[in-house]
Image (cartoon, rainbow, N blue to C red):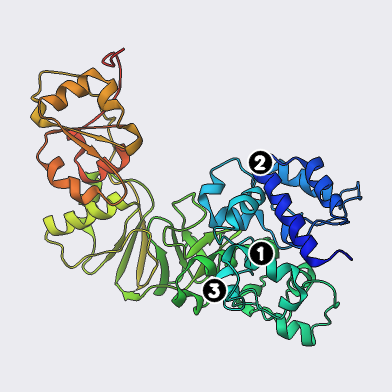
Amino acid sequence: MGVPLEQQFACLAELRRELTASYPSVLSDRLLRIARKYGLDRFPEGFLVSGALADPGPSGARAALRQIRRNTPGHDGTFHPLFSNEFYRLCNPDVASSRVPPWVHYQVFGRAENRTPHPLIDVSHLAAWFPETSRGAILDEYLMRPSAWTADPGPYVDCQKFLLHGNWDGTTNPLVQIVRGRLIEPWVHQRLLLVDTSSGTPASARLTGIGYLLSRSTARSRLSSVETWSAVPDPSPTLPATVMVVPGFFAGVAGHAVAVPSASMVSPDTTVIALPTEFLSVVSGATLPAPALRFIDRALAHGELRTLVRTAPSGAAIAPFSAAQDVALQELVLHENRSDLIVLGYGIQIRVTTDTLSVAEQVTSVPPTPVWEAREERATDLAFVFAPGEASLLISDARVAAAVRAGAAVCILEFGSVAAWMPVLGERSIVVCSSTTMTDVLAFVDRGRVALFDQGDGASA
């Protein structure tokens, strides 16, 4: 650029102050004016926006800022090779659930919070190369100071090897040059370069997926292999076989999905990720032998779970659909004296070597659940089950408030709290739940004792 490096850093600081002042908006004219004031023809590299400031076309800086403002979900931005919208959303659910463009969040908050903008960048790994630099400034140092370009930005890329043997252009940050077109070469770890010619998934999507798995998993998983699973189900897998199971999320055999009950992109234990045409996983967990595997792919009522436990063959492993179902199955195994059965942990990857695999289906017809109405029942026979965000119903509904004052139990059903509430619910003959908690409640309470809460006419003004 011809502009002294410290002047570029000063420009970068002012650009970020402007972004913070206008957050979450992106005021393109002001940002462009700041960069020009410092004599730059492009934004500083740490700003992660490509394109010439004076270029009015689709490859210019103004077009890149326009793309950032659009913030289209599901469309990975191309405004800089080292910022991945989809990767940042995957790694930061708080950003994914907001309307803030990921790039804006990173520049204003994420950088200072040690969040990473790209699958090949690991800020903690870079920190070892810059022990005297604050975490929030490490990536800027790496991107903008040529003397820092020999550092490896993560455990899966070797920039030193690229500088020595990779036909480096001598002027561009080596990681930028690698990502732009030199990925399938020896300086990038092969686990990031799995290529399946039968897959319709773009290479960039796979890179994002694998990078996410490796950045979110344990150190042990970083040393394990990465597997690819076709999303096209195999209706009759060859058995006996080893089934990769994440209860409630995924089951696969020999590279094919067998059951996918969840619409989530990432498994609860962050070892499996769903891409548009395939699944990626890191190998995690133990291998368990079991003569039969029952994989539950939906919510089942308590009576249906009881039937499944009673009829399962000896030694069978059962994969629950939800955390509540996990607790209910464990209680039923004890109650039905079926200590020979194994209940797999919900959302935790395990390998099951089995002769028989079946996806559990509903075994009975389910009558509709009645709506609860205030009757002459004793309050001590009642238990109300609400989700955390529904606690206001205790105040706003006169019937509930009166019942609670007279001795009704109230359960706020949070993840992992089902087991703690089961003794209370077991003592109450009527369990009133909201539509939000209905599925979980029916897993461990017989349907005949359950009623659906409806504010109806009982709400106070």
Residue 197 seen by the camera: no
Q: Nearer the viewer, residue 107 or 34?
A: 34
Sooner in the amino-acid sequence: mark 2 or mark 1 = 2
The amino acid type of the residue labelled 1 equals Ser
Residue 169: which quarter of the image? bottom right
Counting every numbered tag in the picture gives 3
Q: Position of residue 15 (x, y in %)?
A: 73, 50
Residue 30: which quarter of the image? top right
Task: Say which of marks 1 and 3 sits in front.
Answer: 3
433 to 342, vertically: above or below: above
Q: CA distance from mark 1 to mark 3?
A: 16 Å
Mark 2 lies on a secondary structure that is helix
Q: Label 3: which residue?
A: 226
Q: Position of residue 240 (x, y in %)?
A: 39, 74
The 10 Å Cα crowd at callout 1, few under 14, some 14 to 19, many 20 or more, is: some
Q: Label 1: which residue?
A: 199
